[in-house]
Image (tube, helix red, strand yellow):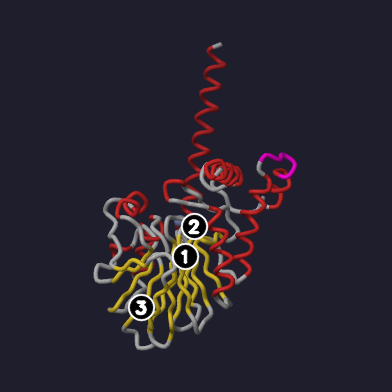
Amino acid sequence: MKKVFKLVGLLMVVAIAAGGIYVWQAYQSFMKVEAIQYDPQLAIYLGCGNSVVLTSEDGSAALVVDTKMRAAAEIMKDKVKAKDITIVNTHDHADHVGGNSLYPQAKIISGDYTKKQWQDDAGKASRYPDITLKSGEEKVLKIGSETVHIYNTGRAHTWNDVVVYFENRKLLVTGDLVFNNMHPAMLPKSGTKVALWINVLDTLAKKYLIKTLVPGHGPVADQKALAAMKDYFVAVGDAIGNKEKQVILKEKYKNYVSFPGMFSISNSLKFIEQERKETK
Ligand SMILES: [Zn+2]
């Protein structure tokens, strides 16, 4: 009997170690930063939460969309040389706002969160934005020759999500309204509401002419990523309570990046089922 206990104990240690290595590797790949020089003025930094930096032609001003966190935030900050910096936070999750404190002189624009909502998601020490846009409000800025639209879509992935549209480039930065090739993060404490999220995806597709789309996570995409995100929610919603459809669903999205217990097909099924119960 003792031998059995020893074996079970050993197996448990191996399983925990393997689980630990898996989580560590997933974390490392999540935090990895890949820089893409899109054109002389605009750089895309994929990884952690995806970011975009637009610098004016004379190098004096920069717009930073999302600031990542920890080491990834520092890697990107080193590349931003302009003195006059405006930050847009697409939403209040730590992987998108964690680097704000590295830009003490910057002006921060975001959606309209209460201080409590902001602190619950971003952390107590996180700097609250200087300018908050109301739901449906759009602010237009000039950075060098580019016209930048900052639009508050209202509640979707969080209580108040913001997108940034670069008019000359026809480039839209969606924050976590789009997860490309990944299962989306849905968090009750952040105010995620899938029914509203779907409407926002439709609105964005109508509102902007999009050549390039930078999602919150995953590789750079185009206009089609909006419809793909919507299709995902519709397919998941349609498979609730239907085992056969769930088998097809799991097969369809088997190559999507997942993080068991956080972002996965079963998490998405559970979340949407719960949301439907609550709205009944
Ligand atoms: Zn997020």
Q: Secondary structure at mark 1?
A: strand
Magenta-tinted stretch: 241-245
Q: Which residue is mark 2?
A: 156
Q: Secondary structure at mark 2?
A: loop
Per the rendering, the mark at residue 153 is 1
Distance CA(mark 1)–CA(mark 2): 8 Å
Q: Answer above or below: position of 273 versus 52.
A: above
Amino acid on which the number 1 mark rests in the picture: Thr
Task: Identify which residue is drawn at 43% across, 84% down.
Answer: 146
* Image quadrant in which the C terminus is located: top right
- Whether residue 242 is in magenta: the answer is yes
Task: Please provide percent x and percent y for residue 17.
Answer: 49, 36
Mark 3 CB within 8 Å of ligand 1: no
**Most common SS among magenta residues:** helix
Task: Please provide percent x and percent y for residue 137.
Answer: 41, 70
Amino acid on which the number 2 mark rests in the picture: Ala
Quadrant for ligand 1?
bottom left
Q: Quadrant of residue 277?
A: top right
